Image (cartoon, helix red, strand yellow):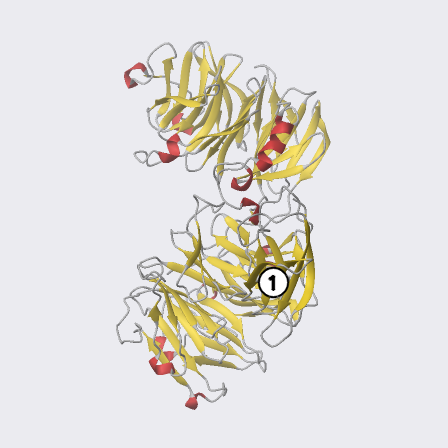
Amino acid sequence: MKRLGILLLWICWVLPGFAQFDKWEIYRAYRTTELVEETNNYVFAVADSSLYVYGKDDQSLTTYSRKNGLSDNKIKALRYNASLHSLVIAYNNGNIDLWGEDGIYNLPYLKNNSSIQNKSINDIYFYGDYAYLSAEVGILVVNLNKREIADTYRIGGVRSVCVIDGYLYALTDSGVSRGALSDNLLDRANWQDYPLSSDQFAVDEISKIADFQQTLCVYVGGNGVYYLQDGSVRRLLYDTGLTGMKVENGRLMAFSTSTLYIASDLNGFQTISGINSLRDVSFLHTADTYWLACGTDGLKGIQRNGSSYAVLVDGLTINSPKSNYAWELKIHDGRLWVTGGGRWLDRYWRRTYIMYYENGQWTNYDETKIQDQTGLFMQDALNVEIDPADPNHIWVAYYGNGVLELEGDTVVNWYHSGNSGLETSSSSNPNQYVRVGGVTRDAEGNLWMTNCNANTSVKVLTPEGEWLGFATEIANAPIVDKVLITSRGLKFVNLQHATNMPGLYVFDDNGTLADQSDDVSHYYASVSDSQGNVLNATQYFSVVEDKDGNIWAGTNMGPIVCYNTSNVENLRFNRIVLADESDYLLNGVRVNCIAVDGSNQKWIGTNGSGVFLVNADGTEVLENFTTDNSPLPSNTVNSIAVDPQTGQVFFAVDGYGVLSYQGEATEGTEDYSNIHAYPNPVRPDFDDKVIITGLMANSTVKITDVAGNLIYQTRSVGGQVSWDCRNSKGRRVASGIYLVMAATEEGGESVVTKIMVIK
């Protein structure tokens, strides 16, 4: 694939018909390399179901996703046809990409076929101009030259196929079948069972079949490799640790996690030992050079010399999050925190995934170090709280294991039912059922925790080490989320279960935490609007406070807002009527999360409808990002966090990782000393908006030419505005210097920066 280098450059700018892709970033896990395919100049590898490419000539590593050319997410299979210079990529959902010298061509036939339930593709095999895809629906025959599905042989679930002497062999769920290529294989009657009798394995133990030197070879996982000769099954290799087999460019390669077996004929294997975490292997034709997918050890290139080998490229890995599980996001001083646990009525039993992203690098906590210190393999980390005085000092809420206090990777405290006020819901296995839904810290240093299935559903740990319990009104509630502490000091707790204690719990401790006699609280199993109408929301998935002190709740019927929190026992929540009065905002849409940006706009993550950006009062929808018009891999978003300094908006899509979008709203600054515009200068090929940032909140911004003629005027809600380099008539301005003047209502107007435009 000599011209792939041109393609790699081409694909970086020839993107699908999605708007503003350059504003998006995708943060996927590339921790465990599972698949590998070698071409002349590149090595393609799949790690955690995502693609990256190693350039042999320049030693570059490049990741690929929907942002820069791929059609989908979660790669299941990958094979390269050296004769046709075509890479076939199969995804979990049945989607197919053909990557050739002239670009990537998508074949969504299986993905879009609603009549097929199981769309999984198990293997890819080449014969002539065709790729035969073994799938649960049968065999998909892809014409690589015409780039189309030529046939679909519906013979049941197929694990692998091969062609020998004019027959297409298929390993199915019930054994091996074959049909003559000269026959109509669309007709199931033209397929015959092909018995493979052996006392060394059962037919249902066969993992894969392959043709090697026009001989049918059989791989039996955890057993060995066999071949058929003169009607008899003969053993070629015995190894109970075998995990895979591959035939490629005149080599039969079988492997375990530590050993690679290579055969050039049927007389036996040569063995290479001492490899760690081997998952896949690829061989093109170059001087006994093999490329290995080695799990968490990354991508390796070796050159065989008899039974030993020389390492050419060792352990290529990509800095990335540890997992694509992303349950909740939090921004603190420019550092993005990601927790990858999960829960509903029961926990998800996911290992400890605590990760943060800062200055372009990911740091992942090591769960084995935590286990060494606690003696327990802790799972389902739901959220973190960060010490404002020390960003490495955090508290982690676990849905089952209590709360962990960490300084770096050192355990400072582990709070569970045996040493704290936290309660467990299991006496027989207490440390696995201390279900904490969330943890947060107030300005006085008190640590607030929600405790599911407990007598007091809200717990507080004071700086003095005293434990307090609150919220007996919602005792034993099963899904208690987090505590929101408002600017007035009120505490809101959302309850997510639809039938077992749904609603909101609100209380005011009146600033006397230790004295509960003056507390005011109320449990809202349902809420009413300002006219007294009961709203029919049954699940409350999130609750946030905006910059005006309004409380927004995300429910199963859409977002609702409380504008007055002065009376805890009589709060009113209203649905938001759109400006055109056509409907309520997101009427009937389940809202998973809401985040507030620097302009008081709301970013709303939904369950199945993508992400919405609405104006400050919610009456206008400004954006709706979905899988159809953005790199979002799913229309369900769990969590959203906005960096107040940069305006970057992060989205957690559980199972697919984290994405970000460069928003335009930032927090207002105290003065104009750090104002700047970018890009600057603005070059002729730039067709987006110039960002002017570092503004004070509520600034009036004017852009003039050097003669003082007004070109554009706007107002910032937060600390940032944008300009499309056009005048009031919509025409792009002439080349020259343009002055940016800003002023607040209280201050005088001043020139704060300049922008050079080159037309």
Q: Position of residue 275 (x, y in %)?
A: 65, 35
The 10 Å Cα crowd at callout 1, few under 14, some 14 to 19, many 20 or more, is some
Relative depth, front residue between 265 and 637: 637
Q: Secondary structure at mark 1?
A: strand
Q: Position of residue 262 (x, y in %)?
A: 61, 22
- Identify the image quadrant of the C terminus: top right
Q: Position of residue 106 (x, y in %)?
A: 46, 31
Which residue is pictured at 33% across the width and 68% down the height?
Answer: 502
Which residue is pictured at 50% across the width and 58% down the height?
Answer: 379
Q: Is residue 474 left or right of residue 217?
A: left
Q: Position of residue 752 (x, y in %)?
A: 68, 64
Which residue is pictured at 34% across the width and 26% down the height?
Answer: 174
Q: Is residue 316 left or right of residue 513?
A: right
Q: Disc 1 residue type?
A: Lys
Q: How many marks?
A: 1
Relative depth, front residue between 456 and 59: 59
Above-or-below relation of 261 to 12: above
Q: Which residue is mark 1?
A: 702
Rendered image quadrant of residue 31: top right
